[in-house]
Image (cartoon, grey):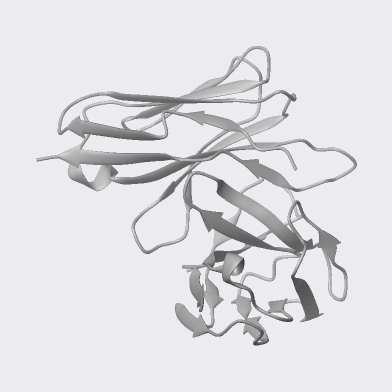
Amino acid sequence: DVKVTQSSRYLVKRTGEKVFLECVQDMDHENMFWYRQDPGLGLRLIYFSYDVKMKEKGDIPEGYSVSREKKERFSLILESASTNQTSMYLCASSSSGLPNTGELFFGEGSRLTVL
Amino acid sequence: GQQLNQSPQSMFIQEGEDVSMNCTSSSIFNTWLWYKQDPGEGPVLLIALYKAGELTSNGRLTAQFGITRKDSFLNISASIPSDVGIYFCAGQRRDFGNEKLTFGTGTRLTIIP
């Protein structure tokens, strides 16, 4: 069964702390994505990666960075957490191979609270 | 970045009722997808549409790719308790291999006992 695993389901951090959110997929997918989900705003793309060591900014990259050192792992980093980064974070992966359905496979999410 | 306008934002219905929701965009998409998120889980793909005017069914779900390529509709017939969750539309443009999806704001479906 295909799986995207996010390391922490719930985190509570203090303002100014550095936060790492880890995501691992076991499907050998080329593409990986980080979204944040907020009520009334849907899913907004933070960063994505089409290959190892490659990263592209999404729609809301400010305050975040990412790392993709291995194909199966994509990390989201909050260098200095702020209260407005309290949110649900969703990792997803997809294949670039054929047939290209556009389907994303999501993890269960990491709910981050910044105090 | 662009977001898709999805309506309604929330729905409160009784079991057995039919449900309709839609998504509109100011831009054209080549692919429309509908995802469902169960409470405490990540979204899961329900239906994918690849051609303007296409009508596709998956059990009690029916989705349509609008003829203008700027909108899509999802209908659920005879709702049951497990239909509860948040439904997201997503559009994709295949520009130079661009895989990015743009998501709607979501429709939260609640079934009243």
Residue A40, how many percent across, how many down?
Answer: 49, 44
Q: Within the image, what quadrant is residue A68 found in?
A: bottom right
Residue A2, how many percent across, how many down?
Answer: 52, 67
Q: Residue at the location (55% across, 45% down)?
A: A41
Residue B12 or residue B57, whichever sits in front: B12
Tell me: B5 left or right of A77.
Answer: left
Q: Residue at the location (60% across, 65% down)?
A: A84
Residue B81 or residue B50, whichever sits in front: B81
Residue B90, how many percent across, how many down?
Answer: 60, 39
* Number of residue marks: 0
Q: Residue at the location (68% across, 86% down)?
A: A18
Q: Residue at the location (47% across, 40% down)?
A: B106
Tell me: B93 left or right of A18.
Answer: right
Residue A72 visible? The answer is: no
Q: Within the image, what quadrant is residue B61 found in?
A: top left
Residue B84 visible? The answer is: yes
In the rendered image, the residue lying farthest to the left is B113
* A15 versus B34 height, above or below: below
Residue B87 or residue A26, whichever sits in front: B87
Residue B54, how many percent across, how many down?
Answer: 57, 19
* A20 versus A28 height, above or below: below
Tell me: A17 left or right of B47.
Answer: right
